[in-house]
Image: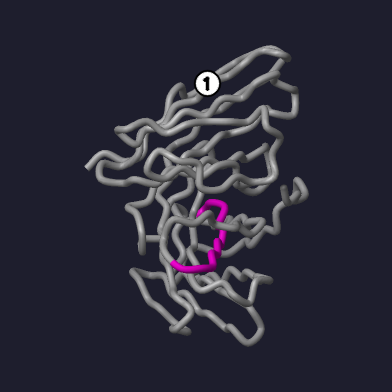
Amino acid sequence: EAGVTQSPTHLIKTRGQQATLRCSPISGHTSVYWYQQALGLGLQFLLWYDEGEERNRGNFPPRFSGRQFPNYSSELNVNALELEDSALYLCASSPGLGWETQYFGPGTRLLVL
Amino acid sequence: GESVGLHLPTLSVQEGDNSIINCAYSNSASDYFIWYKQESGKGPQFIIDIRSNMDKRQGQRVTVLLNKTVKHLSLQIAATQPGDSAVYFCAETAGVGGRRALTFGSGTRLQVQP
């Protein structure tokens, strides 16, 4: 069974640009979560999608947004990139109600110059 | 979001010894806890979980202990191996149902000396 996949693996952007990161959950999983992990720091919760809807978001500005598609894959968009947005962005998925365990993908390393 | 310093607590052990990694949590309503292992350049990998109605759970070479009275969680790794070297995070969640975000601890780096 394939795990959570993310693309691209690395992304280099300049300040002010927009970045789009993609995530495909484990087959059968309906919930997708996004986390930011800055270098040397812990995981900060960004967004949670389930059944196509945003269920919760962390303490991040509105320029961090995303969506979930009918096939449960998800996109994270970061507008007006700032240098401090450089981080590893992790996507996780879970099977649905009653299953709290989240399974993580390998992440997308975003570098903002 | 929560901010953590650049220097993670580090636990250094000899190969073959047992390791104990600790985690304190603050939300008394948390009812589900997970330990993740993160190797350099990779996403966190699920190790073991425990629900609040238990105080101990064992897996292969790993044991998680939960003390709800003092809101403390620990991960014990038996016969630590070089491949166990990684950063270990505890995570907690509270509420009903599974579609919830996890709150992660700051992490502990485990270094296994050969």
Chain designation of label 1: A
Identify the image quadrant of residue B20: bottom right
Hey, which residue is sitting farthest left in the picture? Answer: A1
Report whether B11 appears left or right of A83.
left
| Kind of residue at badge 1 | Thr
Q: Which residue is mark 1?
A: A20
Q: Residue at x 70, y 18 (%)?
A: A80
The foreground one among B84 and A84 is A84
Report whether B10 appears left or right of B56.
right
Identify the image quadrant of residue B73: bottom right
Residue B57, above or below A87: below
Q: Secondary structure at mark 1?
A: strand
| Magenta stretch prevailing secondary structure | strand
Residue A20 x %, y %: 52, 21
Q: Residue at x 75, y 23 (%)?
A: A83
Residue A32, above or below A5: below
Identify the image quadrant of residue A68: top left
Residue A25 x %, y %: 35, 39
Residue B27 x %, y %: 65, 71
Query: How is the model colour-coded?
Result: one colour
